[in-house]
Image (spheres, coloured by chain):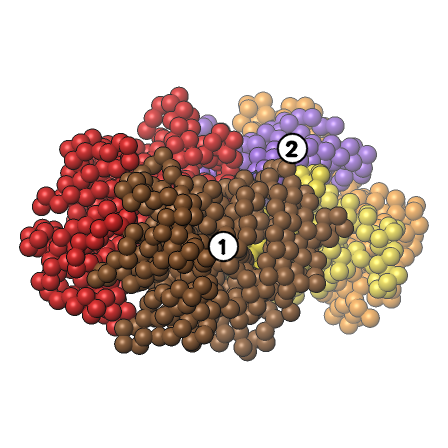
Chain colours: A purple, B yellow, C orange, D brown, E red
Amino acid sequence: MDWTALRLSLTLGLWTIAILLPIGIVVGQWLAWGRFRGKALAEAMLALPLVLPPTVLGYYLLVSLGAHSPLGQAFESLFGQGLVFSFSGLVVASVLVNLPFAIQPMQRAFEAIPSEVREAAACCGMSRWRMLIHIDLPLAWPGILTAMVLSFTHTLGEFGVVLMVGGSIPGETKTIAVAIYDRVQAFDDGAAGTMAALLLALSFATIGVSYALTNRRQGR
Amino acid sequence: MDWTALRLSLTLGLWTIAILLPIGIVVGQWLAWGRFRGKALAEAMLALPLVLPPTVLGYYLLVSLGAHSPLGQAFESLFGQGLVFSFSGLVVASVLVNLPFAIQPMQRAFEAIPSEVREAAACCGMSRWRMLIHIDLPLAWPGILTAMVLSFTHTLGEFGVVLMVGGSIPGETKTIAVAIYDRVQAFDDGAAGTMAALLLALSFATIGVSYALTNRRQGR
Amino acid sequence: EEPPVIAAAADLQFALTEIAERFTQETGRTVRLSFGSSGNFHRQIREGGPFEMYLSADESYVLDLAKEGLTRDEGALYAVGRIVLIVPPGSPLKADGSLKDLAAALEAGSVKKFAIANPEHAPYGRAARGALKAAGLWDKIKDKLVLGENVSQAAQFATSGSAQGGIIAYSLALSPKVSALGKYDLIPAEGHDPLRQRAVLTKKAGETAKAFYSFVQTPDARAAFKRYGFVLPEEK
Amino acid sequence: MSGELKVSLHQTGPIPLKLDFACQPGEVLALFGPSGSGKSTVLRAIAGLYQPEEGRVSCAEACWQDSARSIFLKPQQRQVGLVFQNYALFPHMTALGNVMAAMGHLPQSERGKRAANLLSRMGLMNEAQDRRPSALSGGQQQRVAVARALARDPQVLLLDEPFSALDALRKNELLPFIAKLAREVKIPVIYVSHAMDEVLRLADTLVLLEQGRVAASGPLEEVLSDIRLKPLTGRYDAGSVMHAVIEGHDEAYQLTHLNLKDGTRLKVGRVDAPKGSQVRLRIHARDVGLALTPPWDISIQNILPCMVAEISQSESHLADVLLKTGENGEGSPLWSQVTRFSVAQLGLRPSSRVYAMIKAMSIARSDLAELS
Amino acid sequence: MSGELKVSLHQTGPIPLKLDFACQPGEVLALFGPSGSGKSTVLRAIAGLYQPEEGRVSCAEACWQDSARSIFLKPQQRQVGLVFQNYALFPHMTALGNVMAAMGHLPQSERGKRAANLLSRMGLMNEAQDRRPSALSGGQQQRVAVARALARDPQVLLLDEPFSALDALRKNELLPFIAKLAREVKIPVIYVSHAMDEVLRLADTLVLLEQGRVAASGPLEEVLSDIRLKPLTGRYDAGSVMHAVIEGHDEAYQLTHLNLKDGTRLKVGRVDAPKGSQVRLRIHARDVGLALTPPWDISIQNILPCMVAEISQSESHLADVLLKTGENGEGSPLWSQVTRFSVAQLGLRPSSRVYAMIKAMSIARSDLAELS
Ligand SMILES: Nc1ncnc2c1ncn2[C@@H]1O[C@H](COP(=O)(O)OP(=O)(O)OP(=O)(O)O)[C@@H](O)[C@H]1O
Ligand SMILES: Nc1ncnc2c1ncn2[C@@H]1O[C@H](COP(=O)(O)OP(=O)(O)OP(=O)(O)O)[C@@H](O)[C@H]1O
Ligand SMILES: [Mg+2]
Ligand SMILES: [Mg+2]
């Protein structure tokens, strides 16, 4: 069992949803409530990271975040470390790849909040921030949870982009998905099976608990 | 440009969402409105196809759908053709992999329908079927669309499972994702770029149009 | 009858495509080529994959299948792969197949990342590891390695600019697109286990596959392999 | 075919219920009671949207629910028309679409026309018919909800405060429509309302609910005449209900002459019913004044000789006087509410002879409901 | 600090609006009009939830909206308390949570207690306070909505049919509470209601809306006394509003003696105000009977000598008679509604001398509103 890889994957997953949560909320609300031309195009754009095969997307990211790219150079001069073949690079890639899973369910959840409830909140004098905390987030919670679960699990299983951008460096970019893949490729089905089973059990437990808590809270 | 592969991918995507639509509606409604013990576990279970790296999942599918498996044998004796290394096998794999993307957004969308509206529909004497057509589907439509878009785009880009279960047979199981991947592996960036761009443009247009139509219909 | 599907290791992309075209010209028959990881094909053939011929980058896969009785015989060696050291422009490394410069650069600490294919399962990765071990560099370079899933990915890493160099297949380095991305130098074959590549007809093989199997072993085809950077078995 | 609706609901919690009542076809039964007393819950239980622990609901021959026999029909199988207290319109359909959605039993081709017709009856004109609920005012939404409930051609009509958001003028148009409908289509109608004037105009029977229990029930006139129920029936204090026959009309002055059973004659504003029809009159106790001698040269048209039957004094300034019409009190009971001061001043006692003065117009048109 | 609310809204479509009015602190302004006339829209515009093409809304010194200067403050910045017609409660919070949510301006520690207090005032007790809206009855939800609007300590209170789902008893408790609150906290209150009895009890000023336009506005008494507005004010036909001073109380019979400005004396049920207080009376025209000679030995206590000023005959059986109190018609105007038959029978003409008979109890307590 490759515990380092497992820890790395979980850390990556948590970072990814930690970053996607605010992005999803902001962009999701904007798409849900904003009225502007080309909204459908913006929505369509957000689905695009899914269209390319992950390895190919990873390759494009490798090139556009690499040492020769302006982005990569900017990052390197800021943090003294390249973006590709590093954990930070994985996080960036992961966030990009999971954008559709994070934003779309949140957008739908925000859309489903009855406008009169938000109007009432405004008439109760709630600031934007209090409204977010007390109205928007609680009411959109199931959708937000779905977004988080989809992003988190997808990050755990993501493999093409992660491998391409990360380079499978043990302890830094070799996630559990890569480890399992490697074991399968090396015909070590036993080890692969153990890791897969553990990963599945762990995810199952985490997700099950979050859903159970949400269901209880919603009083269903 | 590998037109065969593109056509294959689109066909696969359409088949996938065509099959996932009824499944998602049924399971989504069941999860949204059913009250039973272990609901959270059922919900968690549905997220699991995402946790494993696609190639690994593909391998497990290959084994469990393959010629030696009871499932594969049953299918073969019914249709005179194996499930793996065939287009049907791709469709089955694709459907399985996309279950979370299809079901979760639909579940949330059904949950968001106010119960009094469904009660009113029942009091209007609507049969289950008419209720589905006239109430549930129209009101859950944005969520269903999200589910379809996520599944469709994910199918287009899916690569690990497809490669493993399908075997990349030109004209039969070699999808555009695999073709692009091949081109990238062969350092044929030009061809890969062309195909990727076309695929992106095509997806962008399709999704943009569906969102635009939905937005208009919803009168937003 | 549908043209047979031929499973071929990814490093044969260029060579085999040309050979298949020639085969079609000469015999009027066509084959469908499916490139991918030799390991994956191995599993797929075991699971009843429809492949009529299998060209593996690692002969052990073929021998395994032969033992399990899934092939007609043990097949034939069609090529032996070679590896090269490739360095992208701007790298502090020199393209030096003897790996001496790599050793010096490692001492100097100017190598931050070095790309090879994953030695756990990729044949070219195993060869690269062999060569690095033989040069006494393995322990020093271990922590700097980025591992590609296959040799193609290792080449992408090596030429991306984010790594200072890498060890990849000669066949890949010869392709015009890759050679434009960096300088390379052959690593002596003595340093690593030979990359013996074996082709075999599976039990499903039909007439066309059999013809193609023979065609791959004709001098014409061998010349093509050679042109694309493979050593021919006899030359060993 | 519709028939009698029988309802019996019993449970201890979470919403306590303990009630039995029946409603005949053509009858309007008002469910009246303070906020939170369980009125909406009762309607929901009848419609099949709420399943109390123990219950029996049957309509005509059909058993809709019987907890003893584990029968519980779905709302779809019950053919009720329900107006929800909060309307519950379909948000994605236009007003017209909402009404048409309840017409599953009609051929597609007829629906549009009938729905438009119903909506017009409700005073919702063309332009508004094509708007979604979100672009309709509260009262307009409510009228759509009523039209939708009627659209199903229900066997039982359940109305949960159907006109609470409507102005008096609209209400005056729609209440008679509902009353007429109940009688013509011969279905049981259950009507929940807090507005006593609506109840008075519509209902035949009154069921008073208090914390889920029936506090009183019976013919409207009886329950309302029961002075003890005043705390529940609210500030619309007791009154008397009388049956009368139309004797004739005075077209010039637009008056109608009525005959009470005991032969007493009354004049009221023109009633739109032929000579000989039976009508029901409600006379508010507070609209009945008393005099010791028959007053003359006053605008009050109806002066009835009566005998005092009973006087109940309260702690306030008011006293309730129960009269019997006729010189010797041989006629119908009639309640009068006067000040205690007047009782003392006029020296009223049981069996005093008095004259009841009822202003013609105090028998307001809205209190004048026709009987079959 | 609150102050006068000035509202001016103009647009041609999609919802036509054309209105200007002002409401003083401590004043209750009733917005009255048929369903769909734009009442809710006006409240929404004041609250900042709807932005008409042209508009000016200001409260005290603060300008909330001025389309000419492109000023449009958000609802959050306006400090209004709004009761929505459909309640719009927060579905995920308990009743208590709903009310506390509007208390952002109070320290956390005080909120719970004040919210519980407000809800109790509304008659929503402990157990119900901890339920979510979905487990509350319609009327209970409505009371939570009112409590929530008050919780913000608003500078302007906007009530959109706040008691439409409440029974008469509850309404009788809550209406005086609102009236008192408006006066004590000295804020402008705008009240939308279809129930004329509520309007009568609460409002000082009446704005009659018709298709988004002000059909009439002014002090309640003036607008209601205007017989031409009857089609708009509905079946609560015209009446007279008079100012009077309390002369004394008759404790034995629980009566209060009033003095009109012209010296006429009236007796009404005990009013809970000290001697010398000013009160406002509303007398329904239909409760005023006429006599040619002063009747005696009758239960009607208030007999006022008057002179006929004007008689307007209608096509129905009714005629409206405008009286002036006093022997020579030197007093206040008083409307009486009698049958046309009576007009003919009594030979009434302008400047006829008559006696108006007003039953003591027909000045119903709910129509008796105190003036400051
Ligand atoms: N989005 C809209 N588009 C067009 N017309 C609208 C829209 N929203 C409301 N209306 C119309 O504007 C008018 C005023 O609506 P409003 O809700 O203000 O009426 P209201 O006076 O409150 O009526 P009610 O007493 O029935 O609540 C109505 O006729 C309504 O149909
Ligand atoms: N899910 C629930 N759990 C507990 N109590 C409930 C629930 N739903 C409703 N109640 C309570 O049941 C009682 C009856 O509610 P119902 O809606 O039938 O009252 P109602 O008579 O229609 O009142 P209103 O006139 O205010 O509409 C109320 O006191 C309400 O608080
Ligand atoms: Mg109710
Ligand atoms: Mg309104």
Q: Residue under mark 1: which chain is it in?
A: D
Task: Kindly identify which numbered label has been placed on residue D220.
Answer: 1
Q: Are marks 1 and 2 on the same chain?
A: no
Cα distance between the residues tagged 1 and 2: 57 Å
- Residue at the spot 68% in from the left edge and 23% down from the top edge: C139
Does E271 appear above or below B59?
above
Amino acid type, mark 2: Val
Residue A39, quarter of the rendered image? bottom left
Closer to us: C199 or C104: C199
Would you say D280 lies left or right of B132 here?
Answer: left
Residue B92 location in percent, x, y? 74, 55
Count of picture labels: 2
Amino acid type, mark 1: Leu
Q: Is residue A80 visible?
A: yes
Q: Residue under mark 2: which chain is it in?
A: A
Q: Looking at mark 1, is its residue's CB closer than 8 Å to ligand 2?
A: no
| Residue under label 2 | A209
Closer to us: E258 or E201: E258
